[in-house]
Amino acid sequence: MPRNYDRRSVIKGIAVSGLGVSLAGCSGGGDTTEPANEDGESSEPSNEDGGDTTESTSGGGSGDPHQVGMVYSTGGLGDNSFNDMANRGIKAAAEQYNVEFQNAEPESPSEFSTFQRQFATSSNPEYDQIFAIGFSQKSALQEVAPDFPDTKFTFIDSTADLDNVASYVFNEHEGSFQAGILAGMLTSREFSAGPSQTNTDSNTIGFVGGKETGLIKKFEAGYRFGAQRVNENVDINVAYSGSWSEPSSGQSIANSMIDDGADVLYHAAGGTGVGVLQAAYERGVFGIGVDARQSETLPEYNGAILGSMVKQVNEAVLTSVGNAINGEFKGGETITLGLDDDGVALLYGTEIGDQIPQEIKDEIQSQSQTVIDGDVTVPSHPDDL
């Protein structure tokens, strides 16, 4: 049975007004724009104080570049997870196509519509495509996109039933099912790798979510379902931090779970999850990352990272840019990516993944095939377990 820890909520917000959007207009990347303040003067942005960072990069080609505005989820770039995967995708698009792009990093949900609208109304440059990265942008996008019917919007991680919005969603519960099988089988046996080992006196694993939303519940449901499918007596501790960008909160929750006997911890908490993986490494247990291959993005903790449930957000971004450039934009459509098309997948850790027993890997592959074949349906909400 799952054990729920006290939820911890951290709210951060910085008001933004009067920011102008402009593009440096040169190729090669790494350029930074200085948004105008309320007096029309430029003010240099920073990750701490808000603002936009422009990446003006082109893969070559004749004609005007395809201009893209990227509005990221709160937590911003440097989360080693969801936002960074989207950024990897737009950088790949800039290498492959004649693309220039600008990044906007809202610090609170109230800024989503501001940045979306700034990109949509910009005339220098005029943006051809605007990305809304993260499910939290739904209400803002539904407000802004109808006002600009000729602008192509791409929504990553949720849906908007609008003709000028292409929506990309993922079957996170299916990839989390794989993570659950790994955790459920490993905790029941004696296993050590790197600085970590399982707790032979316990049969306990943990799940740490960011904000307690329907989307993150999909991760929890799949994880619990997978673990219980291979280990019916497993105890699963569940907690939500209430934040995407508080590693200290993730670390605190993880330490509480480890104190309670958990030896494999899976997170779906964005930047907060960095603290979960740090705790796993420092306390000598195991962690499972999310969204990106975190044994690569967080090499300092890779000795404890069994694997990561990767969502191919980068591929969704690259594909949508290519579709827009090639006249095949999927406006009004929802594209769902799951196990059957490698849209989600458990990727083993680069440092200790090869030490996971082959029988566990074989079981994950076998169980995954039952999902792909339609013989097993992974619940998408804990209430359906």
Image (spheres, grey):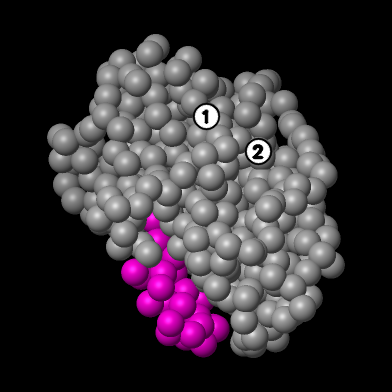
Please provide percent x and percent y for residue 97.
24, 51
Residue labelled with disc 2: 212
Residue at x-position 25% and y-position 55%: 373
On the rendered structure, is 333 left or right of 7? left
| Circle number at residue 137 | 1
Is 350 in the magenta? yes
Amino acid type at circle 2 is: Glu
The three-letter code of the residue at mark 1 reads Gln
| 238 relative to 367, above or below | above
Q: Residue furthest front?
A: 232
Q: Nearer the viewer, residue 315 or 260?
A: 260
**Which residue occupies the foreground of this view, 220 or 342?**
220
Identify the mark nearer the N-term, 2 or 1. Answer: 1
**What SS does tag 1 mark?**
helix
Q: Which numbered dot is residue 288?
A: none
Of the pair 384 and 15, the residue shown nearer to us: 384
Give the residues drawn in magenta, as a range. Answer: 344-366
- Which quadrant holds residue 70? top left
Q: Is residue 129 left or right of residue 36?
A: left
Q: Locate residue 382 relative to residue 177 in the image: left or right.
A: right
Instruction: Give the vertical position of 366 relative to 377 (above or below).
Output: below
Q: Secondary structure at mark 2?
A: loop
In x, y percent, where is residue 80?
A: 57, 59
Q: Residue 343 at x, y = what percent?
A: 34, 53
Q: Examine the image and state in which quarter residue 205 appears.
A: bottom right
Residue located at (69% from left, 61% from top):
235
